[in-house]
Image: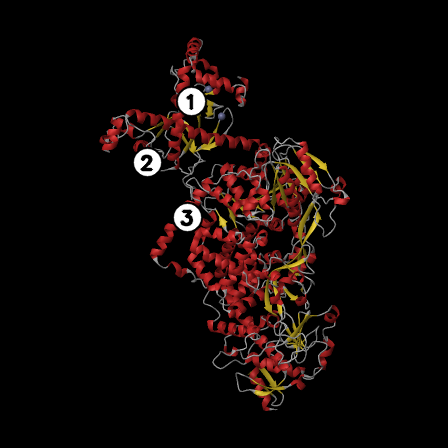
Amino acid sequence: MEFGSTEGTPRGLFTCELCELTTPFTYYGQKPPNTRAIVLLEECYVMKDPFCPEKEKFLVLGSTCSLCHKTVCVGADCSLFYTKRFCLRCVREHLDQFPPPIQAELMKKKPTGKTPGLASS
Amino acid sequence: MMESDRRRDSRTWDWDSSQCRAQLDEVFFRPHDYIQTGSLEHKEFWSFFDRFQRFKGKRDMSLSKGSDEVKDGNQESKSRKKASVDLGLPKDYDARYRINVSVCTRDVEERLGVSERRRQTSSGPGKEEVATCRLTLLHFLDFCQRQSFCKLAKLRREQKSLPIFQYRDRIVELVRTHPVVVVAGDTGCGKSTQVPQYLLSSGFSHIACTQPRRIACISLAKRVSFESLNQYGSKVGYQIRFETTRTPATKLLFLTEGLLLRQIQQDAELGQYQVLIVDEVHERHLHCDFLLGVLRSLLRLRQDLRLVLMSATINIKLFSAYFDEAPVLQVPGRLFPIQVIYQPIPPEEQPSRSEKLDPRPYLRVLQGIDQRYPIEERGDLLLFLSGVAEISTIQDACQTYATHTRRWIILPLHSTLSLAQQDKVFDIAPPGVRKCIISTNIAETSVTIDGVRFVVDSGKVKEMSFDPKAKMQRLQEFWISRASSEQRKGRAGRTGPGVCYRLYAESDYEAFAPYPVPEIHRVALDSLVLQMKSMGLGDPRSFVFIDPPPAASIQTALTYLKEQGALDGHAELTSIGRLLSQLPVDVVIGKMLVLGSVFSLVEPVLTVAAALSVQSPYLRSAQHNPDCATARQPLYSNQGDPFTLLNTFNTWVQVKAERGGGSRKWCRRRGIEEQRLYEMVNLRRQFKELLKSHGLLAAEQGATCWRDRQQRRQRLGERKKLHQLKRDHDLQEGNRRKVLRLEEGEEGVGSSGSEGEEEGRERRGKDGAGQSVDIQEVKFKLRHNVTELQEAAGASRDLSSRQQALLKLVLCRGLYPQLALPDEHNATRKDSEQIFHTRNKQGVVIHPTSVFASDPEVLHVPEQEPRETGPEKGESSRHQLLAFVTLLETNKPYVTNCARVPALQALLLVASSVDTNADCTRVVVDGWLELTLSDAEAALRSISSALTLRDDWERLLQAQLRNSATGPAAPAVSHKDLGKLSEGLVRFLLYTEAASTLLNKVSYGLRRLGGLESQNLYVGPQQVPGLPDAPALNPLFPGIKAEPHPVKGGLRVTGFFTYNCLSDSKDMYSECLRTFWSCPHCDLYMPLTPLERMHHEATCRPAGELQPKEEPEDGKAASSSSSSSSLTRVYHCDVCDKDLTLTSTEILKHKRQHL
Ligand SMILES: [Zn+2]
Ligand SMILES: [Zn+2]
């Protein structure tokens, strides 16, 4: 078992501007390597899925908020995708434009508000 | 195809049909797609599909009922007016908008005209089905992404929450700027997993991290590779004795302290590493203390090397000071508050010596917990006792209580339990029941059990110490140290606030030693000193240890190594010593290997040496199980435990060859821990490779097995399959913990190793497909060639009595001076009261696990001796000794792993000191065993043969070792010479028993000398001038300084044999002892003194056999070896008044002319 050569050399460190999750990424873009059939609908920070033995399985770490252009992770406490990527701050700011299921979700989330950045909003 | 077409047309699409799904597979899961048909993800997709459809169905139903959505929709349109920016979001919510992935599959390709296979679609699923499947696939991909990301986020959260996290940058900075850094942190601070990662991610590479325990190497490598997101790569690996995951890509390696030392032995500068992390230095293991000393001097050679010491917050100053006041970074631990309750045992419940432990104080704690803490509040109990016997006593009492209350499951934990039983302590108790784990100090540091809320500390520990005077290991009970006491307490606060009950007074605690005694102060230092010598570290007495061992300990080790022939008179390594220093085993076992390789006994000796180096595979708990005992019976050998182990191993190999994984059941039936046999087979292979690489074993052996190309291909295919199995196993290995049954503990008492328990373990090992993978079997097959092993086992299975005799001799010479003499009154004692004596320790007993414990009669001198020769009282030809591997004192001094050997023969062939009187009828061995032979002719014959045989043996052995030192070349010793020697040795060993041989039985008395007797044993040096013809005798032993012994008196004939030095000698001049003798090999017939005869025999060989004089001899080696003789010499004949160059036989003949 030798993946040493194919793991892909990190292109840099991805850091979420909201939760500070930091991890090396190996690809940025919409077409993760070795995945012919997959196209991402946004430019993403991608790494090889570390929890999966196959080397072509990828994991999207995060992308850029389409409104404030902050780099955010895909974690549910930091951002959501709804045709575009929105950081949760921006989502809250424009909550009225989001459909009810998302509004409901955000309402539920508020009291727990773990993410440090959200405390102020 | 027609069939399915029709079905679809008639709208009979069936999602549950595998054919229908297969059609969709061709659209979505083609070989080049992201997910392929047949893969694990593919299987998961379809089960996701079912769940997703069910979920959608339910949601559709609930949506059609309510009308809330409409209201919300109105609100939405109202508020939108306020918005400053229009995000351009779709009006109607659809979950698919939340997915940021799209997939290009066959249907899309066709639509886009990429694919030409348009015709096939007409026979595939309809548009609607394709759309459903596509949507589900998108959701599945999204689900997978979320799942993996959550794992990643959780991992990072946990890393951040560790106390050490905030010191991350500081640690990296310190390591960058200092050659040595001490990181001190208590349990739970995360140092072992995090520090290596911090260094790795900040650009350090080639990092080695040592651990005192092998198991920690594996688990840390696993954890750290997972945490550093390299679970499926080899950036992080481990290396232990027989296993490694290291590849050229490995940047961080976990390895044992011992292994790192071995690597330094190979490469003194340790150029392969940039950073060394030595973890758990506070545990003060022998290897670790030594390693620190070696690294301390290595740092001077390697300015670029970085050393990180990691320790609990114990005695930190010591480490810092040893490394030139290295900076210390102290990290707080993460422990929950623990309440300490002192509950000293009242005097009436204190166990008196030799009495069983009183369980009442322990039961009170259990009762107290039951009364005070509601059962809904979870939390297990961990109870520390000193030893196995104590555990079993308390376990019995607690089990009775548990059976009655049904609120506890009692589980013992110590290292002699089977691994399956040890594993149980990690299982979960059912609701309303607590685990009570009764453990030795193994749970103090080695084994960490989560969920412990209560700790009971007896304050006692049993520790091994070494008694250099009796050359005996001693397992004694001590009070623990304050450091251990705190460590035990800490086990209660890992997962929540806890309680620690100390069964001693606070004043006792205050009186405890601050730290445990480091191992280097407690154990025999033989192996350590040998290793130091081989690493060229100079005089071990001047080595700067962090905490130097007592000088006497080092001296004892030096003396012992000299006795064993590993060091010469100047305390330098001998060739055998160099070899022994490479073997990761005790000196005695190593000697056995070297000796065995000289004869054609390699296979059985490899097995025996391996077997004696691992824990016994026989589970003690199964000893009282009658079924096990019966099944074991055929494996027992009344020759001794090494032979039983040899039989066991060989039979097991046979079972493995025939039934593969069925060996597990075979072992279970016999109460055998198969893991030990796997260890043996690995160790055996390591030994074999070492012998090969040292030219002690011809390299071509075994290469013959896979000559056939067909066979090799088959083997390759098989290996590929095995590798796949191992990978699958590794993937599935999780922390799937079983829930314990309430009855679990009840079965445990008495009859452990029961079928039920093992079945449970097997169940757990089953993979998804339902077949059970025995990972040990897989690893075994990957590592070993069963056919080859079977051949080897076959070769050593049916040993002839001659081979057996020779094997015993090899064992005995290896184990010497570890010999025990049966007490003369044993025949009249009960089986359980048989006692034995070693040179330094009287009244030792055979360990109950030995075959001789249940069958001591084979050691007794037979009552009915043929009386024709009229032996005196107590004389017999059947005296036997026990050669043993260890002498260990627990409640009694026990010898373990014993083999019986014929006394006279074994002693004459292996003893390092043999002293006789003038006619050799009284022989004293090593100053403590006296052999009396009434038949002077037989006595002389025995000694003379022994001298000749030992001389030949030594010569062949030295030639072999010289050869190994210069590198593997052509065999230095001819098969013919070896054959003759083995023949001679066998004849010598068996002549008392085999009537067919030329030699008659020799009857002799055997006894241990009393203290006073052994003090006044020798005539002493002043007597020597009295010997009239000493100058004439002297030349009889050319090449050997046959000179008066400086202490004993008499004449030292060889390195081990001193003639006529015993003080009760009949004071006869050797001239008077001349008797007529005819040499069986030449025509010599003349009256000779004992010495003259011995000498003639030593140099005269049968016709057709090489005379020793004609062999080309390396002069240097001959003079360095004390017992080998140079062949011709200058003899000055006083009668002729001439200098003659003659062999000693020729000298004898010459002298005869003048008679
Ligand atoms: Zn984030
Ligand atoms: Zn934003």
Q: Which residue is mark 1?
A: A81
Q: Is residue B148 visible?
A: yes
Mark 2 surroundings: few (<14), some (14-19) or many (≥20) residues within 10 A: few
Q: Quadrant of the N terminus of chain B?
A: top left
Depth order, front residue of B260/B179: B260
- State which mark lies toward you, 1 or 3: 3
Depth order, front residue of B699/B1005: B1005
Q: CB of mark 1 within 8 Å of CB of mark 3?
A: no
The amino acid pointed to by label 3 is Leu
Q: Which residue is mark 3?
A: B722
Q: Position of residue B108 (x, y in %)?
A: 29, 27
Question: Is the residue at mark 1 from the same chain as the one at mark 3?
Answer: no
Q: Quadrant of the C terminus of chain B?
A: bottom right
Task: Compute the Cα span from label 1 to label 3.
Answer: 44 Å
Task: Compute the Cα span from label 2 to label 1.
Answer: 28 Å
Q: Position of residue B736 (x, y in %)?
A: 50, 38
The amino acid pointed to by label 2 is His
Q: Give SS at disc 3.
A: helix
Residue occupying image coordinates x 34% and y 57%: B709
Q: Give SS at disc 2.
A: loop
Q: Which residue is mark 2?
A: B32
* Residue B508 appears left or right of B830: right
Marked residue chain, label 3: B
Question: Is the residue at mark 2 from the same chain as the one at mark 1?
Answer: no
Of callouts 2 and 3, the N-terminal one = 2
Question: What number is the disc on residue B708?
Answer: none
- State which mark lies toward you, 2 or 3: 3
